Amino acid sequence: MSVFDTVFLLFIIALGTYFQTVTGFGLAMIVIGVSSGLELTSVPFIATVVSIISLANSGLALRNHIHHINWECTNTTLLGVVPSSILGVLLLNYLNVQAKYILEFLLGLVIVYSGVIFALRPRQRTKRSRLRAFFSIGFISGLCGGLFGMPGPPIIFHMYRQPFTLVETRNMLLLIFACTAFSRTAYEVVATGLPKNSLLISLLALPCVAAATIFAQRFPPPVRPVTMRQITFISLVLIGLALMYGSVTNYFD
């Protein structure tokens, strides 16, 4: 990567970190979507980087907030997340070699789906879902996390429907994302080792992640929640559609 590409990637990471700290998600979708769409990096490379920096972001964001978590639901969700995240990494490695453009198209589709889900305003349930629902959603989210480095879409919609407070939901999501990133990264270290470039970019990104996390906590966006939803929805849909269009045109070139 050139110096310009590296600096631009670090800026994207800082922007994604800010959104994730404020909303509980957004880091992976923004960073992976934009960097892949602009062909700054490959999907496997940036997914690894995002997994590493997600650990730093979640660790900082969860400081002094670990008590705002429903541990029964979270632990059940993680039982599904951990094994399926490893399965997702295996599938990513296969598709990146055998079907690169299909991988990019699927990535764009997941991001568009994320934007639509975020805009739907899920109606909150009066009674919590059964634990088996948390396990099932955890398995699906772990698969997305291993495959794309973004476990968000399924688990976000599910969590926001539960009768939890906003603080509980945000911190549960951050913890689940952190555990997904940890299991994904640990598997890569054991199975193949992490590429030196991904470690270098991750180390360069850590100060950006720390600064953006602290900045977001002290200076949340001065807009109404509905406006933030609209901005996020439009951004994600545009990123996803651009990825899908690029994968189709590249495939037929």
Image (tube, helix red, strand yellow):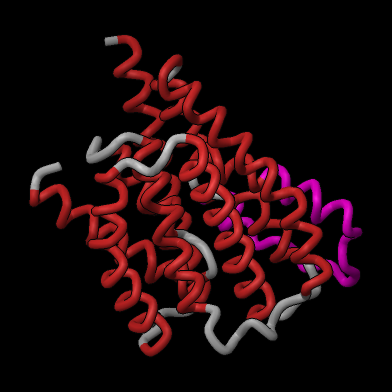
Of residue 104 and residue 77, the one placed in the foreground of this image is 77
> Picture quarter containing residue 214?
bottom left
Q: Quadrant of the N terminus?
A: top left
Residue interval drawn in magenta = 115-140
Q: Quadrant of the C terminus?
A: top left
Q: Give the residue displayed 44% in from the left and 51% down from the top.
A: 29
88 to the left or right of 223 = right
Q: Give the residue displayed 51% in from the left and 42% down from the top.
A: 190
Is residue 148 depicted above or below 123 in this figure? above
Q: Position of residue 107 (x, y in %)?
A: 47, 35
Is residue 41 depicted above or below 174 in this figure? above
Residue at the extreme left: 3
Q: Position of residue 156 (x, y in %)?
A: 64, 59
Of residue 188 and residue 95, the one placed in the foreground of this image is 188
Residue at the extreme top: 252
162 to the left or right of 249 = right
Q: Position of residue 93 (x, y in %)?
A: 47, 27
